Image (cartoon, helix red, strand yellow):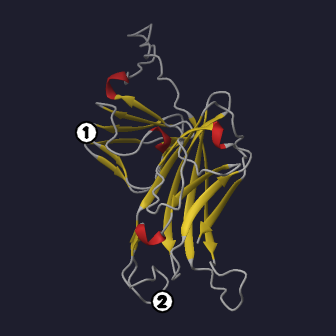
Amino acid sequence: MLFRISTHDLTLDQDIQGFGLTSEVKVTNNIRFDGLDFITGPAETAQSTRVLQSGGPSNFTNGATFISITHIVNTIPSGTCNPEGNKPAPPPLPLPINNVYTGTVVYEDLWPYKRDYDLNDLVMFCKFNLVTDNNNKVTSQVIKLLVKAAGASCQNGFGIQFDNLAPSDVDSVTGSSPHYNYISPGSSGTENGQNNAVIIAFDNVANVFHPVTPVFFNTVQGAAVGTADTLTGILIYRAAGMQPISGIRKIFIKR
């Protein structure tokens, strides 16, 4: 089983899963990825300019490819009227391999003090996309974060520690958005003074969500649902294989 889609513009607000040998998505104009969505599996996406209006190579996972429409060649099988058949053009080089891990974490910022166990001070959806080369060595990570709820009066921040990854192993970090000067990032973007590489995504959750009710965000029963910004961070290693795919990450709030 496979499918073929042909359209002028394409905006993805959910994943597209390829089936069969190779499914086809043909777009003559703009392609946009809206949030944390992917084209995944045996799917070939072709566009006239091969330029995404939003998103990037990490949005094509598990064998999905992105090519120019000019590289599409219809293959005619050999037969009585065409003994030689039609030889297709060489396939495009494969995109990097993506290893995607997702989860939702919840926090209580007064722990271990008692009587407050609702664990809604920060509710965060996380997606880690570890990009590996053809030798299965990790070259970079694409991290996407989305605040689902925040019911704290504290100005909580959010950070990620990468165990067994020294700050000197990191070439660059983009996407971190601290607002206050108590966070001290180094030249590569990781936090100074740490033995392991630490990224502070934000230092005040109120700077990344848009509540409907004052102070609390999506924690008041019956209240309208607010929205939050999707944060995207990219961590690039100095050399492939600095951290295994199973590398341990500690995700924490910073109060």
> Observer-nearest residue: 10 or 185?
185
Q: Give the residue type that dot 2 points to.
A: Gln
Q: Residue at x 26, y 36 (%)?
A: 28
Residue 147 shows in this picture: yes
Q: Which mark is residue 221?
A: 2
Q: Residue at x 39, y 78 (%)?
A: 211
Residue lying farthest top? 84
Residue 193 drawn above or below residue 182? above
- Left or right of residue 241: residue 96: left
Q: Secondary structure at mark 2?
A: loop
Q: Give the residue type that dot 1 points to.
A: Asn
Which image quarter: residue 13? Answer: bottom left
Which image quarter: residue 81? Answer: top left
Residue 54 drawn above or below residue 119? above
Q: Identify residue for label 1.
A: 29
Q: Residue at x 71, y 86 (%)?
A: 113
